[in-house]
Structure formats: C-alpha cells, structure tokens
Amino acid sequence: MKAVALLRTRIAYAETAFAELAIWKVPNPVVGSTHSYKYRLAYVVEGVCVVRYDNEAGKGDHRHFDTEEQAYIFQTPEKLLADFERDMKRWNHENRHS
C-alpha cells in the first residue's frame, strides 16, 4: 500500500493568514510515531508559521505554538484537526492587538 492522501487543502482566512492542511494514511508508522498517519498542519500569518502540528520522521508527533515546541499525543485525524483549530483560535485571540 502506498500513502493515501486523506486531506490536502489550503484555506485563506485573511489576505495575510492561511492554513495548509495535509494528512496521509501510510502503510507503516513514521519513525517516532505509533500510528499509521503522516500529517503537516500549518497556520501562517504575515509570512510566519505561528502554529504547526507535524510528525516528521525521527521527531514523532509534536506541535509548535509561536516559538514553543512540545510533544503531541495523536489520537485520531479528527481530534488532530480540532486541536489545531483550537490553537489557531487561541493564537488569534492572544495576538489580535499585535
């Protein structure tokens, strides 16, 4: 089985803000992860990635929020998308005056 794209999209939220979402079902877990998904979710504002969830090989599941990086516990693709959306809203709320 090859990797199967489950989601690949770019969503514009404003002239200077967009999200890129990509989730694949993979035949074997990415090194560092225990599930059969590969993903990369990014929220970019004014050319800067301010929220990112990914599971790059060797690093496993993790999330970036502003300059902080921490481990992420992957459960399902639906929960991943909900957590990412929650962090986008949080970032927008915390930075609405900047």
Image (cartoon, rainbow, N blue to C red):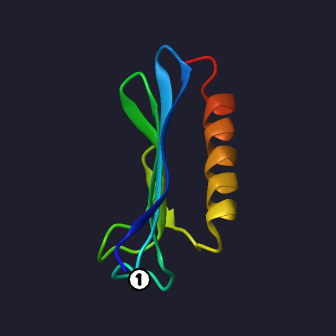
Q: Is residue 11 above or below residue 57?
A: above
Check disc 1 and report its element: helix, strand or loop. loop
Q: Is residue 93 left or right of residue 5?
A: right
- Indicate the quadrant containing the N terminus: top left, top right, bottom left or bottom right: bottom left
Q: Nearer the viewer, residue 90 or 84?
A: 84
What is the crowding at mark 1: few (fewer than 14 residues within 10 Å), some, or many (at least 20)?
some
Residue under the image location 62 percent in, 17 percent down? 97
Q: Nearer the viewer, residue 21 or 90?
A: 21
Residue 41 in sight here:
yes
Measuring from the top left, give residue 2's x and y in whole percent.
34, 74
Q: Is residue 22 above or below residue 46?
A: below
Q: Is residue 71 left or right of residue 27?
A: right
Q: Is residue 66 left or right of residue 58?
A: right
Q: Nearer the viewer, residue 52 or 41?
A: 41
Amino acid beneath label 1: Pro
Measuring from the top left, give residue 86's x and y in whole percent.
69, 46
Say which residue label 1 marks: 29
Residue under the image location 69 percent in, 63 percent down? 79
Residue under the image location 66 percent in, 45 percent down? 85
Residue 65 in sight here:
no
Measuring from the top left, give residue 27's x and y in whole percent.
40, 82
